[in-house]
Amino acid sequence: MTRDHLAPIVYIDGGLGTSLEDKYGVKFDEHTPLWSSHLLIDNPDTLRECQRDFGRIPVDILLTATYQVSVEAFLSTKTADYPNGIGRPEISPFLDLAVSIAEEAKASTARVALSLGPYGASMIPSQEYSGRYDTEHNSTDQLLDWHRDRLRLFEQIDRLGHRISYIAFETVPRIDEIKAIRKVFSRTSSPNWSPSSITHGDVPFWISCVFPGDDYTLPDGSSVDQVVDALLNPAYSENVPWGIGINCTKIAKIPELIRMYESAVSRLASAGQLQEQPALVLYPDGTNGEVYDTTTKTWHVPASQQAPTVSVMKTAFSSQKAKCATSSRGSISLLTPSLTLAVSIAGEQSWLVAVASLLIVILLGFVLFFRDT
């Protein structure tokens, strides 16, 4: 390949909740089940300013502040204006505001992605890192109903399909939930389908998974081969994701996960089950060794682990870049025609992770696109 065929690197924002906490002093607890979306109700100006920080970088894709939106979370949100919670008929204006703020905050050439977390993000405490769901949401069909119902909330927004460029399903921890999301986008399985629906191919979507443990499996134990098959196999839906990805995962695991993703994609392509190559969406953790406690909603360093210093982090990142270049040589060619990378403005350590991630992707690009020149 020649330099003219280099895949574009596209930047998305990352760490909205952390940025709101660190820079703007916003506090989240059990009274704010909507997390960042809570500011749509009581402080949209602060949310707008925080998202403008990303717009001024500028990022190429800006995520809406809707990751933890659900009927359940709105109903559990009690304020002076809504002492009994916010019911379904009252939700739509807040979602419209979320899209409007992203439109205002982004750079003129940037695009908006509708951010949607998994069902686990709506649970209290949240369970997107464990995948341990309640019995009412513990199968593909049950999760299909939940995701379809949540998307109906957004379809009430005027001209939504013209205002967003992507739909981002993030931090998905279970293979049955991947399949449920795929089925949401199937014309044949969706009742009351209308040509204007955002779930039927008019808006590209990506599905990004989380690998929080020490191994290379989803929290439910699914292997990368199983994950990629669920993500891309046309048997689950005629609409295949524009992109597949990895988020909220330790950066040290990214090189090997990329290699495993590539191998799985290659096998699908060789079997004739893949018509187009998906984009690769990467936004790993921007932490300094901390682990997120879903009960207290705080980050902390495990007692058995000493937080690495900045100099140690830099050394580790350099090592990971070298490993990435070595392990990916001669591979990844079937993985992606484009690369999407998250950046965060949450502080020094997040910038280090963002820069390290960028260098990893650049190295991957050189391995991929110049190995045959």
Image (cartoon, rainbow, N blue to C red):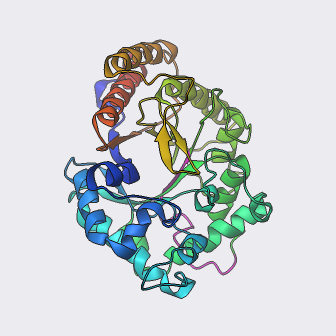
Which residue sits at x=59%, y=31%?
261
Q: Is residue 192 magenta?
A: yes
Q: Is residue 331 left or right of residue 348?
A: right
Image check: 316 left or right of 125? left
Which image quarter: residue 20? Answer: bottom left
Rendered residue at 61%/50% (across/down): 128
Tell whether position 249 is magenta: no
Q: Where are the magenta residues, as a range?
A: 191-208
- The x and y percentages for residue 189 are 72, 68
Spot occupied by residue 107 in the image (x, y as percentages of width and height): 21, 57
Q: Is residue 183 visible?
A: yes
Q: Main secondary structure of the magenta part?
A: loop
At horizontal 52% and vertical 82% (from top left) the residue drawn is 86
Can you say whether 311 is above or below 90 in the image? above
Quadrant position of residue 39: bottom left
Q: Is residue 172 above or below residue 86?
A: above
Instruction: Check the picture and name the quadrant holding the N terminus.
Output: top left
Q: Nearer the viewer, residue 202 or 318?
A: 318
Which image quarter holds the C terminus? top left
Q: Position of residue 73 (x, y in %)?
A: 56, 70
The residue lying toward the viewer, choosing from 295 and 45, is 295
Hey, which residue is sitting farthest front in the picture?
303
- Residue drawn at point x = 37 percent, y = 16 percent: 312
Q: How many marks?
A: 0
Q: Position of residue 51 (x, y in %)?
A: 28, 58
**Where 207 falls versus 299 (above or below)?**
below
